[in-house]
Amino acid sequence: MSATSQPGHGGQPGSPPSPVPPSPYDMTVDPLISSLPKDQLDHLSATVRSLIATRIEGIHYAEGRRSQLLVIGGALAAAGIAFLPLAMSADGVPARWACLAAAVSSILVGLATWAIYLRQTNYPYPFIDPAQTWKWFYHHAIPDKKAFGGWFHSKGSRTAEQAAYAHQWQIFRNQIKGLSDPRTDVTQDVKQLYLLHVDELYKNLFLTQLRKVLKGGVILVSIVSVSAFAAATLVGAQVVESGTVYISDLRVDSSWQPTGGIRRSGEFGEDLEFVLRLKVSNGGGVAFAASGLRAEGSDGEPIFAEFAGFPNPIKIGARASSDFTGRVWIGSKDRSDLERFNLT
C-alpha cells in the first residue's frame, strides 16, 4: 500500500516545509540578566518598564520645548518682516538704519532657528543601528525595512511589497516567540531603556542648542541695532560740506552738515535736514542787509530749500563779519547738486 502524501508549507505536496530564515537581530539573553534569580528578574522587569515610561515623558518634554522655541523663532522672523516697512519710513538716517538692522537681523535669527530645528528633526542618530531594540523600535522589528515604502508605487513594486510582507511575517512570528522567555523580554527592555537615555540626552542637547541660538540671536539683534544707530549718527556727524560765494564787498562762507532728519515731501519724495552755518564778511564801508537766503547748485541756479532759525533780514555792519546758524531742508533729489548758500 502506498503512503499518502501530506501537504507542506511550500513546494510540491509531500515536500518538507520551506525553511524560514533566522531573524537578523540579536536574540540572545544578556549574561547578567541570565544570572538573575526569578524574584530579582521580576523586580528588574517592573523597574525597567517604569523607567522606560519616565524617559519617554522626558523626551516628549524636550520635544515640546523645542517646538516652543521654533514658534518663537518664527515669530521673530515674522516681526522682522513686519518691521521692514517701518524701517524704510523712519525719520532720520540713524533711526532708519537702526530699524533696518533690527529687521534684517531678526529675520536671519528666525531663519537660523528654523534651519537648526529642521536639521535636528529626523537626525541620523549614530546609536540607532547598533541598538538592536527590535521589540520597541518599530522598523527594527521588521526583518528588512528597505523592502517597503518609496515615493511612487508601480504595480510591480506593490506586488513585491506584498510578497515581502508575507515572507517577513514568517521571520517576525519566529523572532517574537522569543519574548515568551522573560529573560529575553527583559533583555530587550534594558536595551530600549539605554537607547532612551541616550536619545533623551540628544534631545536636551538639541534643546540647549536652539535656546542658545535664540538667546544669542536676541542679544545680537540688540547689539546690531544700537551699533547701526551709533554708526549712522557718527558718519552723519562727520560729513561737513562747505562753499563760498562773493557778492561785491561781501564774502559768504557756508558749511552744512546732515542731522539725519528726514521728512516726507509729496507722495514719493523726501526732504533732508541740515545744520547750516554762515559767516558773512563785509569788506565795504557800508552796512548790508539781506532779505533772505537761497541754496544754489554748481551752475548757480537756485535749489528749493526751506530755512529756519535765521534772522530776517540778515544784517552785517560795515567792515564787520557775523556768524549765523540755523536749519535748512533740501529735497533728496537735489542733494547731489547742492554747491553753496547765498544771500538774497
Image: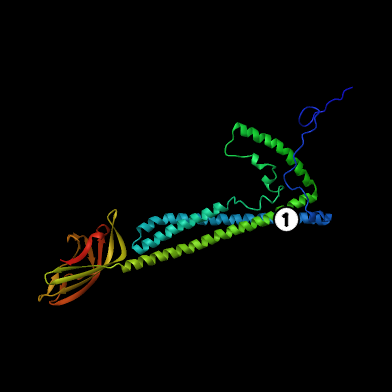
Location of residue 103 with respect to 288 vertically, above or below: above
Q: Residue at x 37, y 63 (%)?
A: 95
| Vertical order, 66 against 3 (above or below) | below
Q: Which quadrant would the N terminus be assigned to in this image? A: top right
Q: Indicate the position of residue 150 as horizontal and vertical percent values.
A: 59, 39
- Taking 264 as reference, is 142 above or below it? above
The image position of residue 139, as x and y in percent, is: 67, 45
Quarter-wise, where is residue 269 in the image? bottom left
Q: Image point 74% across, 54% down: which residue?
A: 190
The answer to whether one can see residue 42 in this image is no
Query: In front here: 16 or 173?
Result: 16
Q: Determine which residue is flagged by label 1.
A: 50
State left or right for residue 7 relative to residue 105: right
Crowdedness near tag 1: few (<14), some (14–19) or many (≥20) residues, C-alpha within 10 Å: few
**Residue found 56% across the figure and 59% down from its top:** 209
Residue 60 x/y as whole percent: 63, 54
Whether residue 286 is situated above or below residue 216 in the rendered picture: below
Q: Residue furthest top?
A: 1
x, y percentage for residue 294?
A: 19, 64
- Which secondary structure lies at badge 1? helix
Q: Quick one: quadrant of the C terminus?
A: bottom left
Tell me the kind of residue under disc 1.
Ser
- Foreground residue among 218 and 194: 194
Which of the 4 quarters of the picture holds residue 54? bottom right
- Residue at 78% x, 45% y is 178
Q: Residue furthest right?
A: 1
Q: Is residue 171 visible?
A: yes
